[in-house]
Image (cartoon, coloured by chain):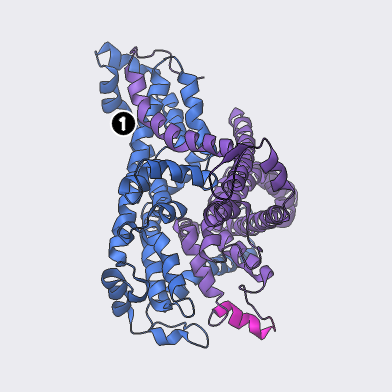
Chain colours: A purple, B blue
Amino acid sequence: MQTKRTLFRSKTLPYLLILPQMAVTIIFFLWPAAQAVRQSFLREDAFGFKTTFVWFDNYTQLFSDPTYENSLRVTVVFAIGVAVLSLVSALVLALAVDRTIRSSQVYTTLLVWPYAVAPAVAGILWWFMFNPTIGILPYLLSFVGYHWDHSLSGFDAMILVIIASSWKQISYNFLFFVAGLQAIPKSLVEAAAIDGAGPYKRFFTIIFPLLSPTTFFLLVINTVYAMFDTFAVIHATTQGGPAQATNTLVYKVFQDGFIGLNIGSSATQSVVLMIIVIALTFIQFRWIERNVQY
Amino acid sequence: MIENRPWLNFFSHVVLILGVAVVALPVYIALIASTRGPNDFYSGVVPLLPGPHTIENYKQVLFAGISTSGAPPIGLMMFNSLVMALSIAIGKIAISIISAFAIVYFRFPFRSLAFWLIFVTLMLPVEVRILPTFKVVSDLGMLNSYAGLSIPLIASATATFLFRQFFLTVPEELMEAARVDGAGPMRFFWDILVPLSRTNMAALFVILFIYGWNQYLWPLMITTDPHYYTVVMAIKRMADVADSIPQWNVVMATVVLALLPPVLVVIAMQRLFVKGLVETEK
């Protein structure tokens, strides 16, 4: 690990400096995580009198549970929906901003602020927009003959949470795409233009391939966002319903643990999620390492 | 700009204006709703033009609270949110900068281990270990307190990592010169490293303030006493209470109040915000 050529010498000072961070990390992160792992191997009886060590029973039970399978499917659909919608709209906006010269700063300001809106607030905003009785969007949809009701239709509920979650994430993706576009050497694009390549050809043969590292990075970040940070969006709007249609993995951990009080199953789900996050973080860091080298 | 294509430029502006409008629409609707009276939301479609009840609605939510939901005034909740956001932002910066200092400028046993332990926290979002963390906080008697709202969220791998990367780029000569002049480690830290890190701290502060203000699940779980509710978590409660017909005018006034502070921070400090966002992810 990198340090400085010359270092300070002290026996106690570095420990004192690192103590607060370590204390918080151990008490509020590592210890609870270890507890989750421990509980995932235990099962409590219905009255909480006796806990038995059950090896991987919780895990086998979890993976054969149709509601968990459903939740996994919901999460995949949701994550793909959020990633595609927010990445595509952010890329289109970033390309448009890249073409403007004088007004780009103004547009950027007008597009980035939703980053600061809390996921729960974003959920409530779109919930209001989509309110079946008075919302403006169901009103517009009724003209094309679509009857919107996210409290009855699982499809409508899924669309609602995807739109609310993507809305907040567009600004983030937009900023990274704008930075990525600015990093593309102008000479490449100019050379292609001199050779007679039009804007569309240039986009697909030069700009998009050179943006692929940014896109990949954002894909990982958006997956993490859709899997974990959208808890509040779902809790504030559909609460996993109707009929489990929006019950993503992270929402299910909360629901089974806090409302269903099924500690063993909830802990097992936590462990599965931790493994997923660790895998995603690892992928992200591999990408960063590779990127740092050139 | 490579070549002049007026229609493509025009099209770009159309796309951008549409984008800005779509992004702003939900907040516009909320803003309008917060200026109307309660009777505008029974039937038909949401109003699109402002009404006359702005001051009345905001006065009610800020100082009186909403009688039907038994919630305290939003003014108090905004104060709680502010305390939470500031303690998280300042706390994270403070403990991260000293631990990064220890990791970069000292060699001590278990240094690598400490670094990796801190790093692991990055991988454990609060949502996935919510139940055991709740238990720890409740065992420590930190439910319904500002300490419980902020301290468990204060460890930050990203901030530590950012400061570490920054310290590694600080020229070696600065430290050598300081040592020649007889400065000890803490003197070097306060007089040289902290002033040099000022921009990084400010950029991090913007990001962390937003992070703290927008916390939802955590305050929802550990506060049962309405005097410690934060504004973001309270909106949900308000929208639920009168489930048949939520009082949309006051709910939306609360929504506007809840999103205003972080949005203003982003707009006012846009340069720092972009810097903080891009650098914490690198």
Q: Is residue A137 magenta?
A: yes
Q: Nearer the viewer, residue A44 or B132?
A: A44
Q: Is residue B260 magenta?
A: no
Give the residues in magenta.
A136-146
Instruction: Write down the chain letter for disc 1.
Output: B
Q: Residue at x 69, y 37 (%)?
A: A56
Q: Nearer the viewer, residue B70 or B270?
A: B70
Q: Is residue B215 visible?
A: no
- The three-letter amino acid code for the residue at tag 1 is Val
Total numbered labels placed on residues in the image: 1
Q: Position of residue A173 (x, y in %)?
A: 57, 52
The quadrant of the image that shows the C terminus of chain A is: top right
Q: Position of residue B224 (x, y in %)?
A: 37, 57
Q: Residue at x 65, y 41 (%)?
A: A213
Q: Quadrant of residue B189?
A: top left
- Main secondary structure found in the magenta portion: helix
Q: What residue is disc 1 on?
A: B194
Q: Nearer the viewer, residue B140 or B119?
A: B140
Q: Is residue B160 left or right of residue A155?
A: left
Q: Position of residue A141 (x, y in %)?
A: 64, 80
Q: Residue at x 29, y 78 (%)?
A: B55
User: Compared with residue B253, is residue B83 higher up or lower down, i.e. above or below?
Assistant: above
Q: Is residue B135 visible?
A: yes
Near mark 1 (Cα within 10 A), the count class, few <14, some 14-19 or many ≥20, is: some
Q: Quadrant of residue B152?
A: top left
Q: Is residue B53 left or right of residue A242?
A: left
Q: Position of residue A170 (x, y in %)?
A: 56, 57
Q: Residue at x 27, y 27 (%)?
A: B190
Disc 1 element? helix
